[in-house]
Image (cartoon, rainbow, N blue to C red):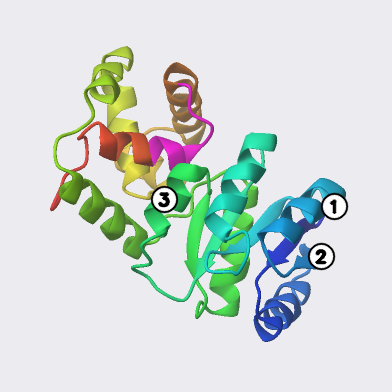
Amino acid sequence: MSIRVLIVDDQMMVREGFSVLLNAMPDIEVVGEAVDGHQALEKVAELRPDVVLMDIRMPGLNGLDATREIVAADADAKVLVLTTFDLDEYVYQALRAGASGFLLKDASARQLADGVRVVAAGEALLAPTVTKRLIHEFSRLGTPRQPTQERIGELTERETEVLVLVAQGRSNAEIASYLVVAESTVKTHVSRILVKLGLRDRTQAAVFAYEAGLITPGG
């Protein structure tokens, strides 16, 4: 079955461009478009897409607030944030709001399609620029949040190690290779981490790791 995608952007040329690129992929289908956050909410409820490509800067209801509302209505919703700026001040907020990943608008057709596939599969799409952005934000904020830090004690040593690797943006396959274990074992660890910490996906797990101080600038 094809991955069903909804494109949300206030610029018609951007929507049309992405539609052409994605519809050219045999496993991806663009099922709808929206010009702002309000229309996005309507389209998501109507079309139930697998992935929402969400622009951040839009008039009316912006992508950040729209993402928050979409995820609040459906915990399984997958939003892939799009922006022109790799240091967009809303990137960190969008990830905390529940976005499953982040992609620059100048990404290649392959990067765009791969990003959609990664998010649809339940993986986190954390490009190096996003990782740097998160580290910068948490460095600026200073001391890790104590309640978050305390919850780390609920994890085993191996689960904590896997959490750090997830926060670094590594895939299950990469983590398995690094730890010299089966990929299925990594998937089990990730699932247990999410359940123990009450998190919805890998992106929230990454944010949690930063907030707990497991990832530090230069670490």
| SS under mark 2 | strand
Residue 167, magenta (yes or no): no
Q: Residue furthest front?
A: 60
Left or right of 206 in this view: 15:
right
Residue 204, magenta (yes or no): yes
Image disc number at residue 192? none
Q: Give how far apart the Cα atoms at labels 1 and 3 are.
A: 26 Å
Up/down of 73 relative to 150, above or below = below
Q: Which residues are magenta?
A: 198-206
| SS under mark 3 | helix
Q: Who's the residue at 78% across and 68% down the image?
A: 26
| SS under mark 1 | helix
The mark nearer the N terminus, 1 or 2, is 2
Q: Position of residue 15 (x, y in %)?
A: 70, 77
Q: Which residue is mark 2?
A: 32
Q: Which residue is mark 3?
A: 93
**Marks 1 and 2: CB-CB under 8 Å?**
yes
Q: Who's the residue at 32% across and 13% down the image?
A: 154
Task: Tell me the kind of residue under disc 1.
Answer: Leu
Q: Give how far apart the Cα atoms at labels 2 and 3 are.
A: 25 Å
Up/down of 21 relative to 167, above or below = below
Along the viewing direction, whichever of 122 and 31 lies nearer the viewer:
31
Along the viewing direction, whichever of 115 and 182 lies nearer the viewer:
115
Up/down of 56 relative to 77, above or below = below
Along the viewing direction, whichever of 56 and 196 lies nearer the viewer:
56
